[in-house]
Image: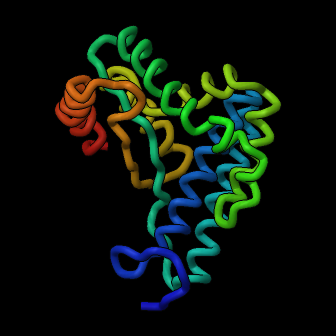
Amino acid sequence: MQLCGGIRYRHGIDINLRIGMSASLKCCIVFCQLTKAPHIHHQHAMANLADYRKVYRERQGTEPPPPLTGDLMFCHEDAGRAEELARRYIAEYLRTILGPHALMSAAFQEIERYDHYGSAVDLFQQVGLDTSLESYVNVQTWGTPEMIVERLRARRELLGDYELNLVSWYGSMPLEEAEASVSLFAREALPALRRG
């Protein structure tokens, strides 16, 4: 195993590189929502993906694993209720990140290994909190099981194979609600995703 900085797991994979890729892809998707320019989003996402693969090959000397994406997930049988609760809890989560001492701070752009957030900070400040919250909520994984499967399949069409890390308990969401959401996702969405 070649050591070149960063936390490693599964046969020496550089987790910092994969997490950075995840953040870059999420920023591209959010930018698409904020700018209403899907062609630009697609170009940036593909450029980021190509850069990730190139850097990974250079640093690891092997083909890269699929990119790792991370989403806040909320699953409910009723589409209206899923949207209502997802918007509430996801927005609460983002507000904690966009607080005055976190992502919206210009100083955040200067922190090593977080510089890829620099353009996100600028854009969030330009468009304001409400638009940022709306865009962030819209790119997460929420809805009925069928809606979630559709969203994740659309992402696969864009990125190809990818690994998904879902966060299922955030904001002020009660534990029981998070457990019901995960159960429904596991029971109905996951089997459909495994079938392709």
Above or below, 7 against 18 in this view is below
Most extreme residue toward the bottom is 2
Q: Position of residue 169 (x, y in %)?
A: 33, 35
Most extreme residue toward the front is 101
Q: Position of residue 105 (x, y in %)?
A: 73, 44
**Across the whole image, how many numbered discs are drawn on residues?**
0
Residue at image position (56%, 45%) is: 158
Whether residue 45 is visible, yes or no, is yes
Whether residue 188 is visible, yes or no, is no
| Left/right of residue 89 with respect to residue 175 in the rendered view | right
Scheme of colours in the image: rainbow
Above or below, 166 against 147 in this view is below
Quarter assignment of residue 97: top right
Residue at image position (69%, 51%) is: 117
Residue at image position (75%, 25%) is: 128
Q: Position of residue 74 (x, y in %)?
A: 36, 28
Q: Nearer the viewer, residue 158 or 3?
A: 3
| Left/right of residue 98 with respect to residue 118 in the rendered view | left
Above or below, 161 against 3 in this view is above
Q: Position of residue 164 (x, y in %)?
A: 39, 49
Quarter placement of the N terminus: bottom left
Quarter placement of the C terminus: top left
| Left/right of residue 7 with respect to residue 23 in the rendered view | left
Residue at image position (71%, 39%) is: 104
